[in-house]
Image (cartoon, helix red, strand yellow):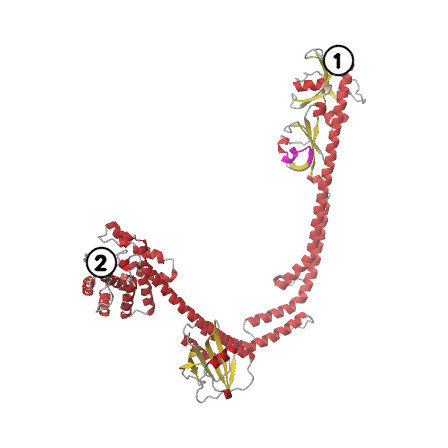
């Protein structure tokens, strides 16, 4: 079956395929995983059980052989004459086996360390501690483990033959290690895949190990294998992972030797060998299931994609603006019903789109306006596009004036001008509008309502009013005169209602902007006063300078935007003096060079204070440059001429005038004429001559009140103007 390219691109096809795959494959995978985990756990448990049984069997064999060796040692030493020096052990053990397979040699120790060979090769008996002597004297066998010549461990078993001093007689036998581990065969009797490791009493050294190529094995034992008397663990030896079981043989009561630790290991590969075939079969079943799911899902997808593609094409046409799109689906299922509903929706959209577009444009025009006259004009020009009528008027109520409003009206004739009149809505009309917040229809026989002004020559049968409320308060009324007596279209009413609500939002925005603007100016004025109150000498200085600068800027023809910048900068021009110590600001005498430097730093400090406020970025040059001189000898940048912004040049003159007209701790207030003379002398040097000229024309007479003269008699003009 050929797979079409549509299937590879369709999201619906991908979802169907994933659905089929999830329903078919996920249960198989989940069942396989559960089975695999269960079988894996069962194999591990069985392996651990086998290892535990094997370690127990080995431990019991070693115990039995030690007991047998003790008995043979007693018998063989008692049969030998003490004077005999025979070195071969051809006798049979008590179980019919050769004694030479059990012992490498047997010696008898008499007379304080003197030994005689009883059987096999001779050897030196071990030196005994007091505890070991006491153990032998008690009639119990003694087992010692010593390092051999070739690095092998020597197992020596001792038994007291005569315990009475001074003629103690002790029989010693060096045990054949292979017999101790494996018995009479002297060869490994473990199952083929098992390995045995025997550790000494401290579990630090291996006494016996069948694992090849594993040196220092005891150091690799996990921590849990050194706790308790038996348990299971896993370890890596020579790159192979093993399951292992350890068992501790406690030999102390019988043989005084503390213990031996037996570790029986089996490779994990051997444990999990039964799972190999399971993995192979699972992959085959999974592949077959996946293929079946793909074939079935592709068939289902192909039967569903044709109507889906047609619906998708129709939707794209609709999205591109082709509202007459029509979808033909002949399948007898839900896709056909969906296509029929889609065609009906497309027809409805085609009939409503033009109206909605007009409404959207009108709403944008209303919401973008921040002037009540523009809002009224927009409504008068465009309202009939969404609501059929012959005449429109809009009444905007005055805040805090019950019923008082301005009514804007415009006739149906193209190009007719808007008319504005002051009206007063009677309480009955206000109550009717409040009771009918969606819309209010007034028939002509009932009279002409106060919120509608008819135009001569225009006939109407009814007036439909749409009141706009803001926080429960009536703020506007849009009234439409209609000559048509047919029933009002609910959709048209809702659209007109929606526009009226947008008008209310626009009026709310205007009020918020006005309130925000008042708040901004109030905040700046409050900040300016906070700066001035640091010293009673400068009380009111900032506000007076702001008024002087504003009037001068208006006379020089600055536009509103630049006048606003000048006003903000004037209110903030001395904000940097917050960082100047009061003792310097109020010092009655002449300032030192260091003090003057701190005073001059206030312009940069002021810039740093207002710099984080983006809305005040346009004031930064004015605040920074208002102490620059026209001849370039000012600070902080030494700018001159037109390098200094015009607002800063205006502020410099206004600042100097008010500072000289006010009392300071180092001098009294100067007269208006003295200050005018100072400004004239500074024109072209400290001040812009053009600004000085306009300033003196604007303030030909003293207008600013001066502060009472201070007790200081200083009258010399300062280098600084404020």
Q: Which residues are magenta?
A: 221-231
Label 1: which residue?
Answer: 86
Tell me if 437 is positioned left or right of 225 in this view. Answer: left
Q: Earlier in the sequence, mark 2 or mark 1?
A: 1
Q: Is 329 or 578 nearer to us in this picture?
A: 578
* Residue 47 position within the rendered picture, expressed as x and y whole percent measured from the top left: 72, 39
Tell me if 93 is positioned left or right of 219 in this view. Answer: right
Give the class, few, some or many, for how many residues have Cα within 10 Å of label 1's Cα (few <14, many ≥20). some
Q: Residue 595, relative to residue 623: is it above or below?
A: above
Q: Which element carries disc 2, helix, strand or loop?
A: loop
Q: Is residue 229 magenta?
A: yes
* Residue drawn at 59 percent across, 77 percent down: 347
Whether residue 116 appears in this view of the structure is yes
Q: Residue 160, relative to residue 290: is it above or below?
A: above
Tell me if 451 is positioned left or right of 85 in this view. Answer: left
Q: Between marks 2 and 1, how big is the CA–CA gap?
A: 138 Å
Label 2: which residue?
Answer: 710
Which is more foreground, mark 2 or mark 1?
2
* Residue drawn at 64 percent across, 72 percent down: 339
* Residue drawn at 23 percent across, 54 percent down: 588
* Residue 21 position within the rendered picture, expressed as x and y whole percent measured from the top left: 67, 57
- Residue most toward the top? 83
Question: Are circles 2 and 1 on residues that touch, CB within 8 Å?
Answer: no
Q: Is 58 or 501 nearer to us in this picture?
A: 501
Q: Residue 11, relative to residue 48: is it above or below?
A: below
Res 103 label: none
Whether residue 188 appears in this view of the structure is no
* Rendered-image quadrant of the C terminus: bottom left
């Amino acid at each position: 079956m050929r797979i079409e390219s549509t299937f590879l691109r369709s999201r619906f096809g991908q979802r169907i395929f994933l659905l089929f795959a999830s329903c078919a494959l996920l249960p198989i995978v989940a069942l396989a995983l559960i089975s695999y985990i269960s079988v894996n756990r069962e194999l591990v448990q069985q392996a651990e059980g086998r290892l535990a049984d094997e370690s127990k069997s080995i431990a019991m064999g070693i115990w039995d052989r030690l007991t047998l060796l003790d008995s043979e040692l007693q018998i063989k030493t008692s049969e030998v004459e003490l004077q005999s020096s025979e070195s071969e052990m051809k006798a049979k053990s008590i179980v019919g086996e050769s004694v030479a397979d059990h012992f490498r040699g047997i010696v008898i120790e008499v007379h304080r360390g003197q030994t005689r060979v009883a059987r096999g090769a001779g050897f030196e008996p071990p030196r005994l501690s007091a505890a070991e002597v006491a153990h032998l004297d008690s009639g119990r066998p003694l087992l010692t483990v010593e390092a051999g010549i070739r690095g092998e461990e020597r197992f020596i078993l001792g038994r007291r033959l005569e315990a009475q001093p001074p003629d103690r007689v002790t029989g010693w036998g060096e045990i054949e290690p292979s017999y101790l581990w494996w018995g009479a065969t002297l060869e490994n009797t473990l199952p083929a895949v098992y390995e045995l490791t025997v550790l000494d009493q401290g579990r630090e050294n291996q006494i016996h190990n069948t694992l090849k190529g594993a040196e220092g094995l005891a150091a690799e034992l996990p921590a849990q294998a050194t706790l308790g008397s038996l348990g299971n663990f896993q370890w890596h030896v020579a790159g192979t992972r093993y399951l292992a079981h350890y068992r501790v043989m406690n030999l102390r009561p019988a043989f005084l030797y503390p213990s031996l630790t037996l570790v029986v290991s089996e490779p994990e590969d051997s444990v999990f060998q039964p799972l190999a075939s399971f993995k192979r079969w699972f992959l085959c079943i999974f592949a077959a299931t996946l293929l079946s799911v793909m074939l079935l899902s592709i068939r289902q997808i192909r039967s569903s994609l044709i109507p889906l593609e047609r619906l998708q094409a129709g939707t794209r046409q609709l999205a591109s603006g082709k509202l007459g799109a029509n979808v033909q689906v002949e399948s007898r299922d839900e896709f056909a019903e969906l296509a029929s509903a889609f065609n009906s929706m497309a027809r409805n959209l085609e009939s409503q789109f033009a109206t909605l577009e007009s409404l959207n444009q009108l709403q944008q025009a209303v919401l973008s306006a921040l002037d009540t006259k523009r809002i009224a004009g927009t409504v008068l020009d465009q309202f009939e596009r969404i609501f059929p009528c012959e005449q429109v008027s809009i009444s905007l109520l005055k805040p805090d004036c019950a019923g008082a409003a301005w009514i804007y009206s415009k006739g149906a004739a193209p190009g007719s001008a808007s008319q504005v009149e002051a009206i007063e809505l009677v309480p009955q009309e206000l109550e009717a509008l409040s009771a009918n917040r969606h819309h209010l229809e007034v028939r002509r026989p009932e009279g002409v309502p106060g919120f509608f002004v008819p135009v001569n020559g225009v006939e109407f049968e009814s007036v439909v009013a749409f009141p706009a409320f803001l926080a429960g308060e009536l703020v506007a009324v849009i009234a439409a005169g209609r000559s048509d007596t047919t029933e009002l279209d609910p959709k048209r009413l809702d659209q007109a209602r929606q526009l009226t609500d947008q008008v209310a939002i626009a009026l709310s925005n205007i009020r918020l902007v006005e309130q925000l603007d008042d708040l901004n100016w109030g905040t700046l004025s409050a900040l300016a006063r906070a700066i001035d109150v640091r010293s009673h000498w400068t009380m009111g200085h900032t506000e007076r300078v702001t008024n002087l600068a504003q009037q001068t800027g208006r006379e020089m023809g600055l536009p509103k935007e630049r006048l606003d910048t000048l006003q903000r900068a004037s209110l903030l021009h001395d904000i940097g003096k917050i960082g100047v110590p009061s003792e310097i600001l109020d010092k009655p005498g002449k300032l030192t060079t260091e003090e003057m430097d701190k005073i001059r730093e206030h312009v940069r400090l002021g810039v740093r204070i207002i710099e984080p406020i983006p809305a005040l970025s346009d004031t930064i040059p004015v605040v920074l440059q208002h102490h620059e001189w026209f001849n370039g000898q000012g600070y902080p940048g030494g700018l001159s001429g037109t390098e200094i912004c015009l607002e800063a040049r205006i502020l410099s003159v206004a600042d100097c005038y008010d500072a000289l007209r006010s009392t300071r701790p180092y001098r009294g207030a100067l007269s208006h004429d003295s200050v005018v003379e100072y400004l004239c002398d500074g024109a072209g040097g400290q001040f812009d001559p053009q600004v000085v000229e306009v300033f003196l024309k604007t303030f030909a007479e003293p207008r600013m009140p001066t502060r009472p003269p201070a007790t200081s008699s200083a009258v010399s003009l300062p280098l600084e103007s404020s």
